[in-house]
Amino acid sequence: SSELTQDPAVSVALGQTVRITCQGDSLRSYYASWYQQKPGQAPVLVIYGKNNRPSGIPDRFSGSSSGNTASLTITGAQAEDEADYYCNSRGSSGNHLVVFGGGTKLTVL
Amino acid sequence: QLQLQESGPGLVKPSETLSLPCTVSGGSISSSSYYWGWIRQPPGKGLEWIGSIYYSGSTYYNPSLKSRVTISVDTSKNQFSLKLTSVTAADTAVYFCARHSQWLVEDYFDYWGQGTLVTVSS
């Protein structure tokens, strides 16, 4: 089992706001990063650090954190946002070790 | 634009060693700011971090794979490589290489290779 826990599936109506969460003890000390993965493609980093977006990522993607839970929010979800989303962070033991969440399948209705 | 490209055999026999190089272009693997990592994804499943290496050769491995994994770097070729010994069908996965940024309180993988499917089968 992963040190980071994600809901397996979430759905959102087109144009609405959706929050995808990631829970784990390490998130009390370390920021989560978020990745979008579409079928047959490599993951794409969408959020890192406190709430940073790489170049080219739409500003409808944002990140936040509270306690042991990190969240990825998509404000005004688009059809092209339908994908798997993964969080990652340092492991709870620190020591440079990295963990990924199990992933959340986002369906845009 | 930084690019990473995995290469290697798509089929490995059980008990043998999986070897995959990752060639980096558009930037130097010797940059002091980054690690270089391997991540895998079994068919239909999630991402699993395998390990990361600094250009100096310092390595960090997933404890669940540590006994079978070696990651090395060849700065002259701008390349880093993964070796996984004693493979079984459970090691069948798409293997990705990626640039790994690790700072005080954050880790992220910002550039990824396209991934290569490795199947373990006799």
Image (cartoon, coloured by chain):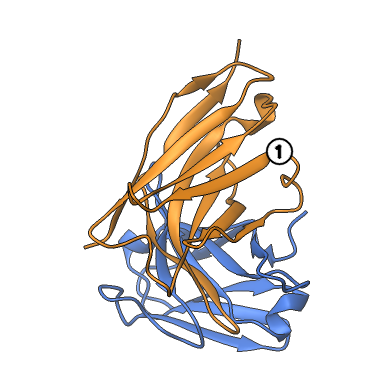
Chain colours: A blue, B orange
The image shows residue B101 at horizontal and vertical percentages of 47, 71
| Residue B50 showing in the rendered view | yes
Query: For the point 69% across and 80% down, which residue is it?
Result: A27
Is A36 or B36 nearer to us in this picture? B36
Instruction: Locate residue A39: give its quadrant.
Output: top left
Query: For the point 35% across and 74% down, which residue is it?
Result: A15
Is A12 or B122 nearer to us in this picture? B122
Q: Is residue A16 left or right of residue B77?
A: right
Instruction: Locate residue B14: give its quadrant.
Output: top right
Mark count: 1
Query: What amino acid type is highlighted by mark number 1?
Result: Arg
Up the image or down, B62 lies above or below B115; here it is: below
Query: For the point 69% across and 53% down, which residue is it?
Result: B62
Query: For the point 54% across and 62% down, which residue is it?
Result: A86
Instruction: Locate residue A87: give its quadrant.
Output: bottom right
Is B25 or B57 nearer to us in this picture? B57
Secondary-structure class at tag 1: loop
Output the chain of dot 1.
B
Query: Which residue has dot 1 on it?
Result: B68
Q: Is residue A17 left or right of residue A101?
A: left
Outermost residue toward the top? B122
The image shows residue A109 at horizontal and vertical percentages of 42, 60
Up the image or down, B4 lies above or below A74; here it is: above
Q: Is residue B11 left or right of residue A5?
A: left
